[in-house]
Image (tube, rainbow, N blue to C red):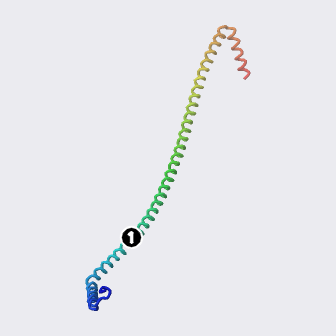
Amino acid sequence: MDLVTPSIGLVFWTSLAFICLLILLRKFAWKPILGAIHEREQSIDEALNKAELAKQEMARLTSQNQDLMQQARAERDEILKEAKTLKDGILNEAKKQAQVEGAKLIEKAKIEIENQKKAALAEVKDQVSSLSLEIAERVLRTQLDDKTKQEALVANLLKDVELN
């Protein structure tokens, strides 16, 4: 039963030891423990603040990255559009130039054909005139071989000359 009913001296000395222990703990242990707890709390707050700042920075960088991607896409589309326009212009210019060159070649060919045609006609005319002269010469020789035929021809020519 001594355990359940402690004596006054024991309670007093136990209380006094406990109060001394509290005073010693307060003076030497509580301040470092509370300082460590406070320091830990500050480091946790700083870590949370840094995490929040990192999160905001990440969101800003993500937004900036998306903006840059949109700008890059817009520039790419613009460059492709300009390239297509340039390609179409070059193709149209090449077609026009080919048509002009083709027309020039056709015109040269027509001129060449016309020149060759004229040369051929001149040659044919020369040959016809040569043949005509040869035929006329042969006809006249055969007609002029006979003296009566010559006199009749001269008389006919004189009649024609007198009538004109």
Q: Nearer the viewer, residue 45 or 59?
A: 45
Q: Quadrant of residue 118?
A: top right
**Picture coordinates of residue 50 (x, y %)?**
37, 71
Rendering coords of residue 126 (x, y %): 59, 22
Neighbours of disc 1 within 10 Å: few (<14), some (14-19), many (20+): few
In the displayed structure image, the side of residue 79 where residue 35 appears, left or right = left
**Residue in the foreground of this view, choosing between 90 and 83:** 83
Q: Is residue 12 above or below residue 76?
A: below
Residue 146, relative to residue 85: is it above or below? above
Where does residue 164 sit, x and y in percent of width and height? 72, 23
Q: Position of residue 98 (x, y in %)?
A: 53, 41
- For the point 39% across and 69% down, which residue is it? 54
Taking the image as shown, residue 52 lies to the left or right of residue 94, namely left
Of 22 and 49, nearer the camera is: 22
Judging depth in this view, the residue of 118 and 163 nearest the camera is 118
Furthest toward the right, the residue is 163
Residue at the spot 32% in from the left edge and 78% down from the top edge: 37
Up the image or down, 100 lies above or below 158; here it is: below
Q: Residue furthest bottom?
A: 8
Left or right side of 95 for 37: left
Residue at image mark 1: 51
Three-letter amino acid code at disc 1? Ala
Q: Residue at x 42, y 65 (%)?
A: 61
Residue 22 quadrant: bottom left
